[in-house]
Image (spheres, coloured by chain):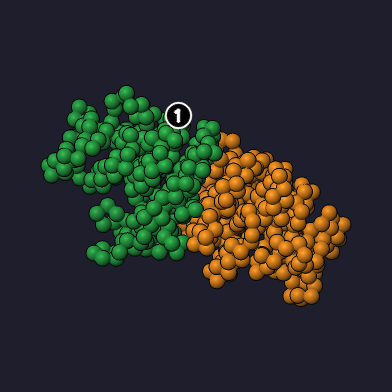
Chain colours: A green, B orange
């Protein structure tokens, strides 16, 4: 089998803005062939936590997830955001179904050790049920994945959406899919200077990634995102790119140079 | 095709009590053959609404669903309850996936007219995507359905779980499934006197249903539940029963007399 598959990860900043959300879904709906959407939603989760008086505690950009917080993210990610996306894709005649890692153990994880930092109910991915995703794709369906995983005891765990997108991409490569993995952001791609459009870096290999890290051009959330890109690339993804959400459709065309492509 | 299919509806009163919830899932997991679970969760939705300061407004036992309330029920039904059930069934080695009516237009609905009473975002079912359910069942999956529907514009709507179970049962009959539909409650079945176990009514046909209604033995939520039973029965369901959740597995055996069976 050598079927194409496009996996798009979209962050909370895009889907939490109604106008951007609708425009992004138009872009995603227009992507041809089998596709999977992975979403975030951290800002909305924090908003609900605050309304409920649950302290929001972030360490290095990662959410510390107590029992009440895992309830909140399950409600916001797998409930409101996930099902709203599914409904709005269906309206666009895309047969989308909203899932999370707990569905048929789609994304299995181990709870992260509580040393050196106890992040609570946070999971490190140990496997993806790619046969299940394959069955859905063969049925013509478009899976929409919330950033949650599940351990063997049935405990739902909080897991970074970028990591889930990368793990899913790697797993689908194993099944012989020709995978394109796109991380959609508010920026044109990885930039030397986010305020200067001309500073877009069109291509990053592992050596350049190291340099960009050392010089501080790449930091914070972009560091693990790049790591996730390289994981997928090493697993055989044919194209991995970081780009602007308005270019989601264009980025699926390998002849178009837009965004930042990650190469080995 | 003449495959058996068991559809179980379980109410909020069972799943909102942790010990009952676990015991019920053990029962459900033990049911043999293809199966679908439909759940409620109204009490938990009301609790979250109250925590968020959103007024809970019920008319004739039906929730008036404003914009904020549809967000709450989407989070509670399709997020927390639905995914917790899916995760806990997977732990029991049942390949469950959590869905709602918005997934691939699984349960399509029309927003209820705002006369004589404006219930807000409440949907009356217009169709069930039974081919989609069939694809999932053929893949060996166990769908778990939250009581939400979706209209053509992608608006998620609140819909009674009993009605969804009945509509799904009817739709699966059309595909040739031999459907057993079970409504699981906190009582042994329909009873003349809920405090007297000996008053269980083993069998109700349409004439008896009318009498029970006129004498007031059957009232409130049991009235529409019986209506839903008759809809499924008229659509060809081989067995429709109302019984105690502890008997879920027994009720799938047509040779066992337990609960109240609905006949034409």
On screen, residue B75 above or below B198: above
Residue A261 occupies which quadrant of the picture? top left
Q: Quadrant of the N terminus of chain B?
A: top right
Is residue B229 depicted above or below A93 in this figure?
below
Observer able to see residue B158:
no
Which residue is pictured at 36% across the width and 57% down the height? Answer: A123
Chain under numbered label 1 = A
Q: Residue at x 46, y 31 (%)?
A: A33
Q: Which of the image's four quarters has the C terminus of chain B?
A: bottom right
Disc 1 target residue:
A32
Determine whether B177 is above or below A264 in the image: below
Q: Residue at horizontal 66%, vertical 65%?
A: B249
- In this picture, residue B92 sits left or right of residue A48: right
Looking at the image, residue B103 sits to the left or right of residue B262; the answer is left
Which percent across, then down, holds residue A207?
16, 39
Looking at the image, the residue that sits furthest to the left is A215
Quarter of the image holding residue B155?
A: top right
Badge 1 marks a residue whose secondary structure is loop
Query: Which of the pair A97/A229 is nearer the observer?
Result: A229
Front in this rendered view, residue B109 or B34? B34
Where's residue B157, x and y in %?
58, 45
């Amino acid at each position: 089998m050598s079927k194409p598959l496009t996996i798009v990860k979209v962050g909370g900043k895009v889907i939490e803005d109604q106008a951007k959300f609708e425009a992004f879904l138009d872009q995603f709906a227009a992507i041809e062939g089998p596709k999977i959407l992975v979403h975030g939603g951290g800002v909305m989760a924090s908003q609900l936590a605050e309304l409920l008086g649950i302290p929001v505690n972030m360490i290095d950009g990662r959410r510390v997830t107590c029992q009440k917080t895992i309830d909140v993210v399950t409600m916001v990610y797998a409930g409101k955001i996930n099902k709203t996306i599914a409904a709005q894709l269906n309206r666009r005649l895309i047969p989308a179904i909203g899932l999370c890692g707990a569905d048929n153990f789609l994304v299995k994880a181990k709870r992260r050790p509580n040393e050196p930092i106890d992040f609570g109910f946070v999971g490190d991915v140990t496997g993806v049920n790619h046969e299940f995703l394959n069955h859905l794709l063969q049925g013509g369906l478009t899976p929409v994945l919330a950033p949650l995983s599940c351990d063997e005891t049935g405990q739902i765990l909080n897991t970074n959406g970028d990591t889930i997108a990368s793990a899913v991409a790697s797993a689908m490569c194993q099944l012989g899919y020709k995978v394109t993995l796109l991380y959609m952001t508010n920026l044109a791609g990885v930039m030397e200077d986010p305020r200067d459009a001309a500073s877009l870096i069109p291509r990053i290999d592992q050596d350049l990634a190291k340099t960009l890290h050392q010089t501080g051009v790449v930091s914070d959330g972009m560091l693990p995102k790049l790591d996730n890109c390289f994981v997928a690339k090493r697993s055989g993804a044919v194209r991995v790119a970081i780009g602007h959400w308005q270019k989601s459709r264009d980025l699926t065309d390998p002849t178009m140079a837009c965004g930042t492509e990650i190469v080995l």
